[in-house]
Image (cartoon, grey):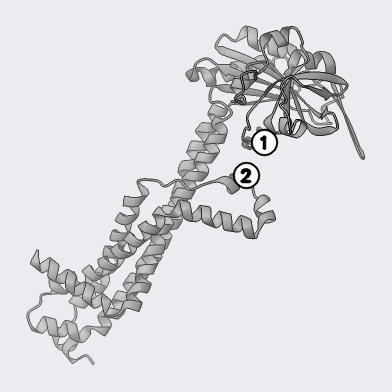
Amino acid sequence: MNHWGRTLRMSVKSLLMHPMRSGLTVLGILIGVSSVIWLLAIGEGISAKSQEQIAGLGAQNIIVRTIKPSSDDFEGGLYGLTRDDYHRIRDTIPTLESVLPIRELRREFRHGTRRMEGRLVGCTPDYKDVVRLTLVDRPDNRFLTDLDIDEERNYCVLAYEVAKKLFPIDGAIGKSVMIDDEFYEVVGVVAPRDPTAGVGGSLAAEDFSGDVYVPISTLWRRNGDMEIIQKPGQFQQDIKEVDQITAKVANKTDVLKTADVLRQTVEAYHPQRDFGVTVPLELLQQARTTQLMFILFLGLIAAISLVVGGIGIMNIMLATVTERTREIGIRRAVGAKKSDIVQQFLTESVVLSVVGGLLGILIGLACRPLSIALRTFLFYQFPSQMESLPELIRTVEPILVGWSIPLAFLISAIVGVLFGVYPATKAAALDPIVALRHE
């Protein structure tokens, strides 16, 4: 113990004699170790955000959406999902817990002189649970009911931003909103809901901030199936009955099998393939596989940083051996063994890498607050450029991976040993007589 303690003291004392050189060597390992922790944390944060957005679609849901055929295959008229598809899915697939038809239109909402354009969503009461909407906490607040659907009532529920825009002073509930030429009584207001991101090109991003929800039976009766879009230089006429059918499977283990059955059921009546099926559970599994590959890729990049730091250690130690050749000769002359020389130089190498590793871990632990501070600074300095970035990049926060701390420290220690062996053995192999004559 005394021998190892004396060796350690000599190594530290030797390193402190050249603080600048030792500090720069430690810096290389520090950057490598902190890179391991930071890159893994950023990768975990991006993966968690992505999986959260996919999970927001519902792991037990199967989403079928209308897709407009290309102009080459489409001669006009009705296309996409129909009311019959909705009834067929609901009545023939026993593993489904609920089936939700959705029809969406762009409309202007008016109250007095206030106007706002947004998305008019025809839906059923299940919509609230399927897309995870919550109501603003008020005793007279409610979502749509089955009775509203059956009686085709002119009731509506407003998104929080719509209620705030049209009714900035008094409450919206009980008031009327005009949509097209019809008045709809407001029966509820939902709390703000984060938008979902587009998923893999199979599902578009969805923003709930400008929504007004009405009974789908009322929307079918009032608006029919034709939608005409007129803009400068553009005229578009679409005829479709349902934009989306979201089916919730009762048991999570049946999701993939049910998705196959559902896909075959719809395909039998849609030879021109005017629909698409998205299974969030499949996307979730793919996202987890991608996460592992992403972590391996980032780990490889960080490992390269550590190797560069290790080469720095070896370079400095080789220079030290040359510089201290006479000292090595004196030690060998007074009885030091080759193993003593190896131990001394190897200990110096390990001390450099371990100190760098510990400092790198401290910086790695601060990755979350430092990244938030950096993002805030960038938003302040470059607001338009930051706003143009994808939502996933703008909002992602690093998540510290617990096992990355001991892993990074272990790798730094191994780097110290591996890159210190050659200089140490070279020092031990010096001839004592030649070393003593070295100037």
In this rendering, the answer to whether 98 lies above or below 366 is: above
159 and 26: which is toward the camera: 159
Residue matched to label 1:
205
The percent position of residue 403, horizontal first and vertical second, equals: 35, 46
Name which residue lies at 64% across and 10% down: 90
Quadrant of residue 322 in the image? Answer: bottom left
275 and 24: which is toward the camera: 24
**Which disc number belongs to residue 391?**
2
Judge left or right: residue 339 versus residue 275.
left
In this rendering, the answer to whether 149 lies above or below 380 is: above
Name which residue lies at 21% across and 73% down: 11
Residue that sits furthest to the front in the current view? 170
In this rendering, the answer to whether 129 lies above or below 364 is: above
Quadrant of residue 138 in the image? Answer: top right
Three-letter code, disc 2:
Glu
Judge left or right: residue 103 versus residue 97.
right
> Which type of secondary structure does the marked residue at label 1 adopt?
loop
The percent position of residue 131, horizontal first and vertical second, equals: 61, 25
The percent position of residue 358, horizontal first and vertical second, equals: 32, 60
* Quadrant housing the C terminus: bottom left
Category of crowding for the residue at label 1, using alpha-carbon neighbours closer than 10 angstroms: few (below 14), some (14–19), many (at least 20): few
Quadrant of residue 60 in the image? Answer: top right
- Disc 2 to disc 1, how far (Cα)? 10 Å
